Image (cartoon, grey):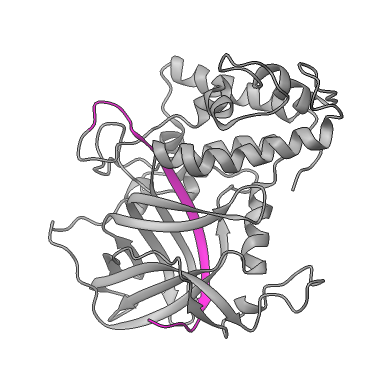
Amino acid sequence: MLLDPHGGLMRLFHLVLSMVGLAACGYPRLASLAQADAGPDASSSTSPDAGTDATIVPLGSQYGYVVSKATVVPAAGHLPTELGLDLGSKTSATPDGKVDNQFGQALVVLTDLNFDVQRALDDAINRGTIILLIDFQTEDFVNTGNAGIEVKFGANPVPAACSSPMDAVCGNHLTGAASFSIAADSPRDAPLGGRIVNGTFNSDAGNLTLKIALGTTAPIALNLIHARVKATTISEAGIMSANLGGLLTVDALNTKVGPAVQTLFTALLSANCTDLTSPPNCGCTGTAATLVVSQIDGDTGTARDCAITVDELLNYSVIKTVLQPDSCSKDSCTAADSLSVGVKIEGVKATFPI
């Protein structure tokens, strides 16, 4: 879960300072930079197709898939915006032609601290602690005005995800031939209706619930509002690529993401500090642990106690910067009230109750 922490926090400071510096100098935000690199067609490829305000009712056959890969941290040389979608601006949920994924930027920072967020999610999917099922309905995979997508939580894979408790690879349920039941905690979000044009599906906005992992295989559910989906290369056999994007409320950030990130920092201190009852130094060694107890412990005005609370973590200036709300969850806002989230998935064929 945790690699060598030395030097990671210093890179974090440099990254955030560069972000703040760009904004102060009037440079475009990262989403705009990503589009500039992508070329003149970038905005049209990530924004939903124009249409009427009428609710789209999905028609046709229903096809089942299980997510075999979910990416929340971009590979080296790529940007978080490549995982996101156009979710609007700070003052409106209406798409504005810019790709959003502020949460992905925060996960890049955690990764720079040597918390292997992506590997934890990969392990959770391969071991079956996170099973995301996709129910996709359409009359045609090339062109139709009445398609729809729904995400469900799965359970009881056949075959089992791992051959034995000693199986280090697992993923037996991700071959395209597995069956699943629907988990008791599966969301009841209405399907997101949308259109397929030349093989690309773009949904209208709605609610979407996902499960991800942050640093451990323990899943956390993210209830995304004003969510959208863009999927390409869809067939009966699988979904080669789909971007899922939505907005995370500040309350969800505080109650779900905050505690999960706190677990990472608690593990960091446990691994690198020998006396967690003796503040302020707490017996910590290594750059990252030393800076955490000196900069975050007690940053809300409470006495230092060699432990990091959620409030201390989310109010620490550096982390607060990368988790700053960047989007509007309503028709209009005077200021951003939510955090944009982007996840890229791949899926293989699966059987489950539809």
Q: Is residue 253 above or below residue 281?
A: below
Q: Residue at x 37, y 59 (%)?
A: 229
> Is residue 335 in the magenta section?
yes
Location of residue 92 by image quarter: top left
For the magenta stretch, what is the residue range? 333-354
**One can see residue 234 in this view:** yes
Q: Is residue 238 above or below residue 277?
A: below
Q: Residue 160: horizontal and vertical position, in percent?
A: 66, 80
Q: Residue 79: horizontal and vertical position, in percent?
A: 54, 42
Location of residue 69 by image quarter: bottom right
- Comparing 352 with 305, the one in front is 305
Q: Left or right of 193: which side holds 222?
A: right
Q: Residue at x 57, y 22 (%)?
A: 316
**One can see residue 339 in this view:** no
Q: Residue at x 51, y 57 (%)?
A: 211
Location of residue 209 by image quarter: bottom left
Count of labels in the image: 0
Q: Left or right of 68: which side holds 113?
A: right
> Is residue 323 in the magenta section?
no
Q: Residue 268: horizontal and vertical position, in percent?
A: 75, 36
Q: Is residue 120 above or below residue 161?
A: above
Q: Residue 70: horizontal and vertical position, in percent?
A: 55, 59
- Comparing 33 with 307, the one in front is 307
Q: Left or right of 50: which side holds 113?
A: right
Q: Left or right of 209: which side holds 202?
A: left
